[in-house]
Image: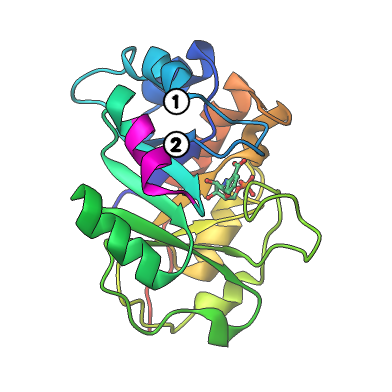
Amino acid sequence: MSIGVKICGITEPASLETAIEYGADWIGFVFFPRSPRFLTPAQGADLSIRMPTNGPARVGLFVKAQDSDIQAALDEVPLDILQIYDTPSRAAEIRNRFGLPVWLAYGVSTRSDLPAYSDLDGLLIEARPQIDALRPGGNGQSFDWHLTQNWHPPAPWMLAGGLTPENVSQAIAISGAQAVDVSSGVETTPGVKSAEKIRTFIQNARSTCARSKS
Ligand SMILES: O=C(O)c1ccccc1N[C@@H]1O[C@H](COP(=O)(O)O)[C@@H](O)[C@H]1O
């Protein structure tokens, strides 16, 4: 089975085109003002219209967002999926309110941080942010990929945090992830993606087989 790849934090057309050309499954638009990848709804719309009908899905990323913030983005960008940094109950509320699939992010540092139950559509499993982190993700921080071995995920999940073209194969092999998400690992500086890194990341992820779970 092919490994799913999400390229998150796209801010300009050139990197969007590269991600599409090399077959990314999901493109992430960050609607979190404190991110160097922040897009206004209008900027998101300008990128979104460049995406082909049968291309990658559009994922909108929101951190502790109000309904009005999500609605403002949806008014301009036809998002397919909402990636949420908040509590499970708030994530379920958002799914009910907007009727779209919701992926909830979990910051993990120990096995007990991995969710045993979820009624959501997807889980982002990434490193628990440092206490003084400016944002809950997009920090280039990884966790011990062995933690997800023999975990019984309650929903489809994606590995994120600190992934790079150089380590993505090893991360997949160790963690057993069937899908991966990257933002800062394919950048030259915060918010500026590298076409070469996007290309290599996708190719390296796709050439790896996740270990079967036992
Ligand atoms: O990318 C951001 O700026 C961001 C801001 C707030 C929350 C999450 C964010 N990004 C997500 O974080 C993970 C890991 O990113 P990285 O590859 O370590 O930089 C990923 O899911 C991004 O979508």
The residue at the point 66 percent across, 44 percent down is 166
Is 120 in front, or is 40?
A: 40
Does the magenta-highlighted stretch encompass residue 99? Answer: no
User: Which quadrant: the N terminus?
Assistant: bottom left
Q: Is mark 2 within 8 Å of ligand 1?
A: yes
Q: For residue 132, which numbered disc appears in the image?
A: none
- The residue that mark 1 highlights is 19
| Quadrant hosting residue 185 | top right
Q: Could you tell which of marks 2 and 1 lies nearer the N-terminus?
A: 1
What secondary structure do most residues of the magenta stretch adopt? helix
Mark 2 and mark 1 in contact? Answer it, CB < 8 Å: no
Is 143 in front, or is 172?
A: 143
Amino acid type, callout 1: Ala
User: Which quadrant: the C terminus?
Assistant: bottom left
Tell me the crowding category of disc 1: few under 14, some 14 to 19, or many 20 or more residues within 10 angstroms, Cα based: many
Give the x, y percent position of residue 4: 36, 47
